[in-house]
Structures are given as C-alpha cells and as structure tokens.
Image (tube, rainbow, N blue to C red):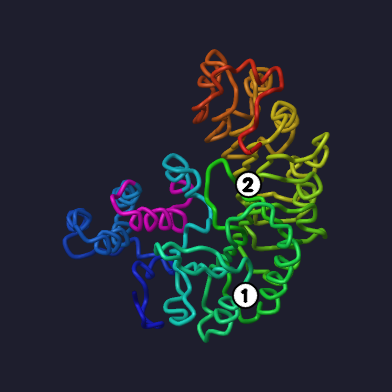
Amino acid sequence: MNNNPNQPREFDGVLGGEVPPPVSGVVLGGIEGVKNRLKSPEARERASALIDALRYQEEGFELVIEALKDSSDKVQMFAARLLQNKGGEKGKEALLRHNPQQCFTMLEDWQFETFYPNIGITSAISTAYNVNLYREEPNPRGEFRVVEDFNLDDLQVFLNDIQVSEVEALACWMPDKIYLEIYHQECLTLINMLCKASQKLRSLKALFIGDRRQHEYKKSRIYLSDMISILESFPKLEVLKIHGNPHNNLFSQKIYHPSLKTLILETADNYALALAQVCTLELPSLEYLELWGGRCRYSHFDFFKTLFSGELLPNLSYLGLPSFENTDVLLEALVQSPIIERLAVLDISMGTLTDNGAENLLNCPSVNRLHTLNISKNCISPQIIQQLSQLDCRLIADSQEENYRRGEAGSRYWALHE
C-alpha cells in the first residue's frame, strides 16, 4: 500500500491526466520499441507504453485497442480510459465493440479500497473508498458477523480526514440483510450527513449507496430514502449508483443536474412513483441510465413517456431496463418513441419478453441503428432469435426460457421476482 498521500498511485498519470501526448512526438525505439515494452511482464510498463503508443496515430491506436484484452485488469481499464478520453468516435466504437459499458463513466473506473479508521485515507487519487456503515466482530471460527446494523462512526472519521477533499469516489455499504425497514430513516440520516459534508467532499465524482450483497438475481431489498438532496448538494457528481428498495420516494422534486453521466438503480422491489420521479429529472449530461424493475407495483407505463421522449436526457446512449414485468408492453412503447433513434445500447434482459413482444423489435427500423441489443434471459423462441440475429446490430440473446410458451401464459417469473 502506498502510504504517501502525495505519491501518485499506479497508472495515475493518464487516469487523472487531461493533456494528451503530442501526436508528432517520437520515443526511444520508435513504434517497435513501444511494441516491445507492451510485451513486458510488468503491468506498469505496459501501461506506460500505451501512452507513447498514442504518438503513432493509427498504428499506435490499434495497440491501445489490443490492450483491452491485456492479461492485467488494470491495463485493460487503463487502455479503456485512454480510448474514452483521447480516442474520439473511433475510440468509442472500439469500446462498444469490446465492452459497451467501458464507453461510459462507471464506478469501476476507480480502484476500490476499504477505509480503515486507524489508517485513514492513504491515496485519494483514482481511489474509490469503501466505508462500512455497520460494525462486525469475529466469531470463534474467525468469521465475521454483523453486531450493529447501522453505525456511522467510520464515515465520520472518513469525513474528518485531512485528505477527504481529494477523494473522487465513495461507496457507503450497508449490511446485506433483507427488509430492513429501519433504513428508510437511517438512510436519511446518512444522506444528511453526506450533504452536510459536501464542502469537504468537493472533489466527489462518484457515489454508491446500498447494501454489500452482490448477486445476479438477489438485488437488495433494504429500504432507502429520498436522494434529491444528494443531487442538490453535489453538482459535480458524475456517477450515482443506488442499491436498494426506493420505498416510494426516490427523487421527490424535479431537478436540473448539469454533470451526472451515469445513474443506476438496482433493486428487487421498485415502485411506479420512484420510476416516474427518475423520468422527470433533467440530466443533460446523462449517457448511461439503468433502472431495474422487479416488483414494480404498477398498472401502466405512462410514467415512461417523458423518459422515452428523450427531451430531458439529450445525450442518453445506454438505456437498461432489466427485470421488468410485462416487458412486451414496455417494449411496444419504447420502439415507438423518439429515444430509440439515439441509443447505442438497449438492455431489456431478465424480463418476460415473448415472441409477441420481440416482433416489435423486428418491425422497428431504428433498432438497426443500435450497436448492442441485450435481450438475454427472457422467453423468446429459437425461431424468433434467429430472425433477430439478422438485425444490423450486436445481439445478446443467451439463456432464454426453455419452455418459452409459459411467458405467453403470463406465468413466468421475471428475474428478480424472488
């Protein structure tokens, strides 16, 4: 661990840099020297070589693209950030082809590190700090168990740290328990605490609030509170990821936020009111929106009309609506809306999409403008999948319900039903 707060972390030079390398410059050994350095067993040396590769325009650009497959996750992320920041349209196309999510600003762009109060903040640059909002103790077997569900002591120490003003990303973790209704109030206490410290957190770009359980089909059901003050207090925030039950109110007011690029709500239990409130946010910089459905408790999709019009989200490129009930009806409204014409990625996976709903995709010319269409884990027949594969876009359609006719009968569970 690097204990010098002023010493850059690995790869910080490009991840935080704004000045591109001179395109007319040369380096010792030329392009062949760069290629040799990219064979180094040291990840740091390979990342350094990528900076110099950009000096060689087309050939060097291809080397950066190839580094997206590097054996080191850090080098892959490094190459993705170079393409994202310096690659223009060609860089975006390369990222879309390799992994669409790498085109967008995500929490994963930062390196996660757990905050320990007895150590403090050791390196704020390019680090996302995990702060636990619960207290654990070891049992006789050496395993840890939660002994206090909600405790803000560590967060208070974090906020009082002299380097907190440099922190760009923060993850506030709650314990992985189900149906903790107390969190509706406790989460409000957390939000108020963060907002009160907004001047200290003046460099904050990315924020996660939710429980620590990470499972593909078991999204959080802990109760959360109104997040509107987070957007009001952090106008420079670029990423907001929420993992929990919105408990009706999620954004109680309409608001204009100039900087938010990525908004994600992962939940097993959503509410029509919460979804409607998201749809009224004016987010001119938003590129990535992911809203999980689950048990939405709705009878219609009228609240999506504003979202699908695209008027409040002029730069939206990625729309994820996974695990929704009545996916056929949702998709019918989507393909008739203006927003479908500007999307690069559409994710309607893990829902109840049937052959009838998929016909809307086949009959929508704008779907061919997509780069990626994800309809995996629905209930579509092999025959319709074959027809969809002829669309002029990348199709992800794995793991369809084997007995797909169950979907037509309305008996199929969507992915987060239980």
Q: Quadrant of the C terminus?
A: top right
Residue 13 placement (x, y as % from top left): 37, 70
Q: Amino acid at mark 1?
A: Leu
Q: Which residue is mark 1?
A: 152
Q: In the shown orientation, is residue 55 left or right of residue 362?
A: left
Magenta stretch contains residue 72? yes
Q: In the structure shown, which secondary structural element does the residue marked by tag 2 occupy? A: strand
Residue 352 placement (x, y as % from top left): 65, 27
Whether residue 364 can be seen here:
no
Q: Which mark is residue 302?
A: none
Q: Amino acid at mark 2?
A: Glu
Q: Looking at the image, is mark 2 or mark 1 earlier in the sequence?
A: 1
Badge 1: residue crowd in 10 Å (few <14, some 14–19, many ≥20) = some
Q: In the shown orientation, is residue 153 left or right of residue 180?
A: left
- Position above or below: 115 against 104: below
Q: Which residue is mark 2?
A: 290
State the residue in front, 360 or 21. Answer: 360
Residue 332 placement (x, y as % from top left): 73, 27
State the residue in front, 257 or 162. Answer: 162
Residue at 62% from the left image edge and 40% from the top image edge? 343
Residue 251 placement (x, y as % from top left): 77, 58
Part of the protein shown in magenta: 69-91
**In the image, which is nearer the foreground, mark 2 or mark 1?**
1
